[in-house]
Each structure stands twice: as C-alpha cells, then as structure tokens.
Image: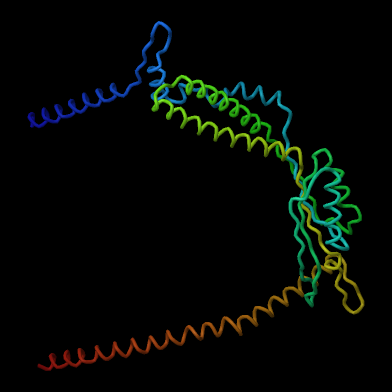
Amino acid sequence: MKRSLLIIGTVVLVFALIGIALVGAFQPRYSLSAGGVSDEAASLRIINTPLSMALPQEAPAPEMLAQNVETQKRMVIQTVDLAIVVADPKTRMDEIASMAETLGGFVVSSNLYTTNYGANYAEAPEATTTIRVPQEKIDDALKAIKKDAVKVNYENRSSDDVTSAYVDLQSRLKAKQAAEKKLLEFLDQATDTEGVLAVYIQLQQIQSDIEVLKGQIKYYDESVALSAISIRLIAQETIQPVEVGGWKLQGAANDAVQDLVYFTQGFARSIIRFALFILPSFILLAIPLYLFFLIARGFYRKFRKPKAIEAAQEEKK
C-alpha cells in the first residue's frame, strides 16, 4: 500500500514539474536596452502580451459613463402607429407620400391590396404605408394625415430613450479608435514577419469592430432624427352600417349583427369543408387501414389454428 502511494506521489510530482517548466518556457520575455525597448522585445511583447494589457481598455468606467449620459443631449426615438378610415385609400396614400417629402422625409414602404367585407364579400381597397419625417415635424405630419379622415380607429405613439446606449457606443468607439492607433504604432515598431502578422490580425479585428460601432451610432442618429409613422388606410365603405329592412343599425347593434353574419358564414364554411374534405379524407384513410386489419387477422388465425390443434392433440395424449 505504501509503495503504491509512493509511486502515485512521484508521478504527480513529475507532471507538476513538467507543467511548471512549460509555463515558464511560454512566458513573455522582455529586454531593456540603454535606448529603451529593443526591436526583438517589442515584437515579443506584441505577440505574447494579452490585448487587454497592450491596448487601451474598451469598457469605460461606470462613473465616466454616467457623466457622459448627463452631458449628452437626450436621444429619443419616437414612433407612431395609427389606422384611419378614408374615402379612397390609394389617393390618400399618394397624398401622404407627397406630404412626407414636403416635410423633408421619405416613404419607407407602401402596400395597396384588396379586402373583402360584408355578407356578400364585396371587395374594397385597403393600404398600409410607413413614412419617416423629421422628429420636430411629427405633430405636423400627424395633423396632415388625420385631415379629412372619416374616422381614426386607433393611434399609438411611443418613445424610446436610447441615450445610455448611444453614449456607451460612443465610448466604445473611442476606446477602439485608441486601440487602433496603438496597434498602428506597434506595426511601425515590429521588424519580424511574425510580429507584423500578429499586429495585422488584431488591427483587422479592431477596424471591423469600429465599422460596426459606427453603423450602430448612425442607426441611432437616423432613428432619432427621423420618426417612423405607420398608417393603415381603411376604405369607408367597409365600415358602413348593416341595413335590415331599410333600418340602418348603428354602434353595438351593427357590430352584433355583423358578428352574427360572420359566425353564420364561418359555420356554413366549416360544415361544407367537413362534408367535402375532412369526411372523404377519413374514408380514404380508413379503407387501407381496414384492409390491413383484415389481412393481419387472416394471418393471425392461419398460424394460430395449427398451434391450437397441436395443443388439443397433446392434451388428448
């Protein structure tokens, strides 16, 4: 027992010594000359020193970030979503696009399509469009959009304060740019191919991160400067009250009758679908399954009957 423990301890000690030797062999080596750091030491420092030690720290201090947020102008993204009833959705969509351009904005997307309404499924045009206008003119744009509208079905306006995220992106961009400058200095100092390659790889990554941060900052700048307004344009005829015997139903009565009509239509469609699609599909599936059952039962009886006969004969013996 003691001999086994001694052997195990010796093996562990040998592996520990080998590990210490390997760690020491791969530690970065620095050499100082009278004139400062030699070229070889500079190259080794670039290769072996972690990026977090050789380059400026990316993450800003929390207190510095808080101070930047206080001094930064508030960055608020405003968006509006509304639906209005108009006499002619297509014409109104064109007017909204022209209004957006007049206010210094533009059309992001627009879609004109046909919708069905009423008991006889009559067709009517409907449209959706999204525009962007300068934030300071958003109230003017909403006033122009709702002008001459038959009805405003809903209007949702929301604001998103992105000041903290914007300041954080700016701080990270400054840190990345400082790191880029430092790497360019290292690149000038490096003399061997290995050192130049190590710096170039890190420089490429830093420059890629810088472009991503610039893109995010640009997105925030544009989103804050230009507010998005999404409008749904509903044709006036689709909200006309139901007429029963010359009596036009209004309000809750109109909605209740419309719901009853829609329910009846849906129920009738379900019965037709069940009779013409679901029931025949079940029958088509049931036929091969029943045939398979008959075949399986025949094989079962065929092989089971001789065994039953043999068992009966053995009992007689």
Residue at 59% across, 35% down: 211
Is residue 291 shown to the viewer in this render?
A: yes
Q: Which one is in front, 15 or 52?
A: 52
What residue is drawn where x is 76% and y is 68%?
115
Q: Quadrant of residue 73?
A: top right
| Relative to 127, 269 lies left or right | left
Which residue is at a point 88% across and 63% down the rendered structure image?
A: 87
Colour mode of the rendering: rainbow
Place of residue 307 in the rendered image (x, y in percent of width and height, measured from the top left) = 20, 89
Q: Position of residue 111 (x, y in %)?
A: 75, 60
Q: Quadrant of the N terminus?
A: top left
Nearest the viewer among 30 and 161 is 30
**Residue 156 in sight:** no
Quadrant location, the C terminus: bottom left
The image shows residue 220 at horizontal and vertical percentages of 68, 37
Image quadrant where residue 234 sits: bottom right
Q: Position of residue 29 (x, y in %)?
A: 34, 18
Above-or-below relation of 42 to 207: above
- Taking the image as shown, residue 185 lies to the left or right of residue 119, namely left
Q: Nearer the viewer, residue 172 or 186?
A: 186
Q: Residue at x 42, y 84 (%)?
A: 289
